[in-house]
Image (cartoon, rainbow, N blue to C red):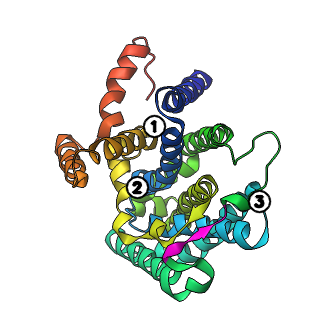
Amino acid sequence: MKVLKWWWGILLAFLLLGAARIFLPLPFANEIIIFSIYTMGCNFLLGRVGFISFGQPAYLAVGAYATAFYLYYFGTNPYIGILLGIGVGLVVSAIVGAFFVRLRSDYFALVNLALAVIIFYLMEKVLAKITHGDNGLWFLANMSSTPVLNLGKPGDFFIFIFLVAMALWAFYKYLDDSLFGACCLGTKINEDKLRFLGYSNYSIRWMAFIIANTTTALAGSLYAVYFGFVSPAITHPARAADPVVVTILGGVGTLYGPIVGSIAYTGMKDLLSGFIANWELFIGLLLVFIMLAGEKGIWGTLDPYLKKAFYRKGTVPK
């Protein structure tokens, strides 16, 4: 039965991501999947560990600029650039997380926001000679063709990020069902009891922080390769709340929340911005409604009804 749940979950994630390609223009579908990967880390931190982070743009920029520097100054293979972005993101997350996870959730949110501001200032002003400041780094023409999937082609790139998103979904599904996932939830709900059982709250939070923000750095690398361009705007503090908004919109702590939230947020942004200048106001009102309705988000609201519709009585998964 457990294997069946896994396959149903993978099939549903496959259909959600596949629908983005079938019913939406290719550039829009690529943007949605990158955004959903970007949100996965924030969703894990907020839903499992109870940490709200307004510093995700900082880790997004770490991955994006690591990839951009390689492709602009050193090499041409986008796959190597992506791996480099993941590696740098992992190292930065491990170093920063060693200090940040000692803080309580409110201070944690603020110190991460401060990090995003610092990274933005570094990329825009201090390191302007190598980042080219607001003009950014353009390297699309530098990327070489790659075998099997040529990431320079939007169609091949979609297949690649589709597979990456599916792998990440399966990974987070595994984490949720694992002892580590239970410990993450334990440190959110009752850290004293977890400590009594012999687990280190600090180590659990640190590992969760590394996993979440390495995922965010991966999203930054994918962003860089897809657009062939990176500028300090990627880490602008004004966009610090975006992944948090998408997480709440999709459903905090739900596996499908990042996908559903990304589709809803990106769709509303592109649709409303053509008619309403201050489209963020509509998103804000929608979030207020969701919070007042029970904080479940879109997927959290639909989930019970979908379970009743697709599972026989007595076989509904927990």
> Which x, y percent locates residue 266?
38, 45
Q: Return the residue at label 3.
A: 80
Type of amino acid under label 2: Pro
Please identify the quarter of the rendering in which residue 286 is found.
top left
Give the vertical position of 203 relative to 308 (above or below). below
Give the vertical position of 173 relative to 51 (above or below). above
Please identify the quarter of the rendering in which residue 233 is found.
bottom left
Type of amino acid under label 3: Ile
Mark 1 / mark 3, whichever is N-terminal: 3
Which disc is residue 77 wearing? none
Type of amino acid under label 1: Tyr
Q: Is residue 138 magenta?
A: yes
Give 80 or 75, whichever is nearer the viewer: 75
**Figure quadrant of the N terminus:** top right
Give 118 or 301, whichever is nearer the viewer: 118
Q: Return the residue at label 1.
A: 256
Give the vertical position of 263 relative to 52 (above or below). above
Mark 3 / mark 2, whichever is N-terminal: 3
Per the image, label 1 sits on a secondary structure element best described as loop
Per the image, label 2 sits on a secondary structure element best described as helix
Asked if the residue under mark 2 is in contact with the one under mark 1, i.e. CB atoms within 8 Å, the reply is: no
Asked if the residue under mark 2 is in contact with the one under mark 3, i.e. CB atoms within 8 Å, the reply is: no
**Figure quadrant of the C terminus:** top left
Q: Is residue 199 visible?
A: no
The mark lying in front, picked from 3 and 2, is 3
Question: How crowded is the residue under tag 3: few (<14 C-alpha within 10 Å), some, or many (20+)?
Answer: some
Give the vertical position of 170 relative to 200 (above or below). above
> Which x, y percent locates residue 170?
60, 39
Q: Which residues are magenta?
A: 134-139
Q: Return the residue at label 2.
A: 243
